[in-house]
Amino acid sequence: MNRSLVALHAHPDDESSKGAGTVAKYAEMGVRCVLVTATGGEAGDILNPAMNRPEVAENLADIRRRELDEAAAIIGYKEVEMLGYRDSGMPGSDANRHPDAFVNADFDEALARIVAIIRSVRPEVMLGYDDHEFYPHPDHLRIHDLSLAAFKAAADPARFTEAGPAWQIDRLYAPVFTARRLYTLSDAMEAAGRESPFTRWLDSLPRDAADDRALTHVEMGAYIEQARDALRAHATQVDPNGFWFQIPTAMIRDVYPYEDFELLAESEEGDKPEHELFSL
Ligand SMILES: [Zn+2]
């Protein structure tokens, strides 16, 4: 299929936890998938106890780059572009004030780099972020702002004239975790006599939370394991016994084999495919 997708992410591992099954599916269909990662994940904690060793901490940026390349290959990304900023860390942490931190980078400089990639790849679909009510990491909020700005700027021939001819992306989506998805999976775990891994989020998310976002549900049940393998490739960030892996793949396939995407912007209003990001 002669189509392209550009996915914008904040940190190494985000590409594997947000929409990875869907990207794997499109990559297998022949879509050229290009990953753009803004930072090196330098400020992220080592969340896997088995990897919490001094030699890992000393070489964290290199190790995370190798983990990212491995994860991207598992998902099926053809190219990985690093924007080269530093992880800004969680709100209020010292990493926020580092001069190379993504949050401190000039907005238009970052925008110019993203626009150049879009105009070179010419994707029909771009993935960015929503405004992250559950996870207000400053780098994620920046990706939200940049993805909306890049969608507009790439199509405007008067902007960034040195970055190649203007390109209009059809649609910009954000992978999202909906109340429906979290409760459906949680209920299935509890019905099987097991503890839900989502309890800490569900406390702040009512079961009947109205989801009035424009959502597209992409069936990706055949790609759940591939997405999990990509997450496991981030061995310094992802605990192989952590919450990501507690729901059996077969259970997800049975009750909710979808990833949900919010439509953030589109080139023209009109008919959209109900269960796909591309007009196939
Ligand atoms: Zn992140």
Image (cartoon, grey):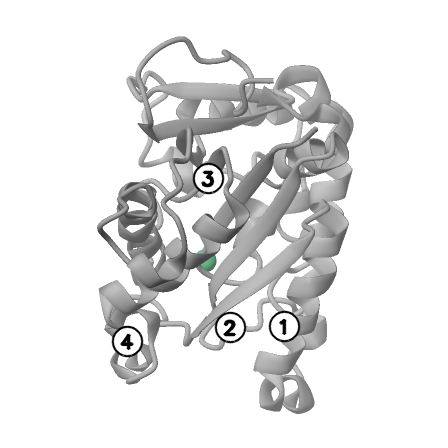
Which numbered disc, 3 or 2, marks the residue closer to the eye?
A: 3
- The residues bearing labels 2 and 4 have C-alpha atoms spaced at a distance of 14 Å
- The residues bearing labels 1 and 3 have C-alpha atoms spaced at a distance of 22 Å
Question: According to the image, label 3 marks what residue?
Answer: 126
Asked whether residue 240 is in view, the answer is: no
In depth, the one of 218 and 26 nearer the eye is 26
Question: Circle 2 — which element?
Answer: loop
Question: Circle 1 — which element?
Answer: helix
Question: According to the image, label 4 marks what residue?
Answer: 96
Q: Is residue 126 above or below residue 222?
A: below
- The residues bearing labels 1 and 2 have C-alpha atoms spaced at a distance of 7 Å
Which numbered disc, 1 or 3, marks the residue closer to the eye?
A: 3
- In the drawing, what numbered circle is on residue 65? 1
Would you say 22 lies left or right of 211 here?
right
The picture places residue 229, in percent across and down from the top left corner, at: 76, 49
- The residues bearing labels 1 and 4 have C-alpha atoms spaced at a distance of 21 Å
- Which residue is at a point 59% across and 81% down the rendered structure image? 60
Of the numbered discs 3 and 2, the one sitting upstream in the chain is: 2
Which quarter of the rendering shows the C terminus?
top right
Would you say 53 lies left or right of 104 here?
right
Dot 2 crowding, Cα within 10 Å, few <14, some 14–19, many 20+:
many
- The residues bearing labels 3 and 2 have C-alpha atoms spaced at a distance of 21 Å
Q: Is residue 131 above or below residue 209?
A: below
Cβ at disc 1 under 8 Å from ligand 1: no
The amino acid beneath tag 2 is Gly
Question: Circle 3 — which element?
Answer: strand
Q: Mark 2 and mark 3 in contact (Cβ < 8 Å)?
A: no
Of the numbered discs 3 and 4, the one sitting upstream in the chain is: 4
Which numbered disc, 2 or 4, marks the residue closer to the eye?
A: 2
The picture places residue 109, in percent across and down from the top left corner, at: 29, 68
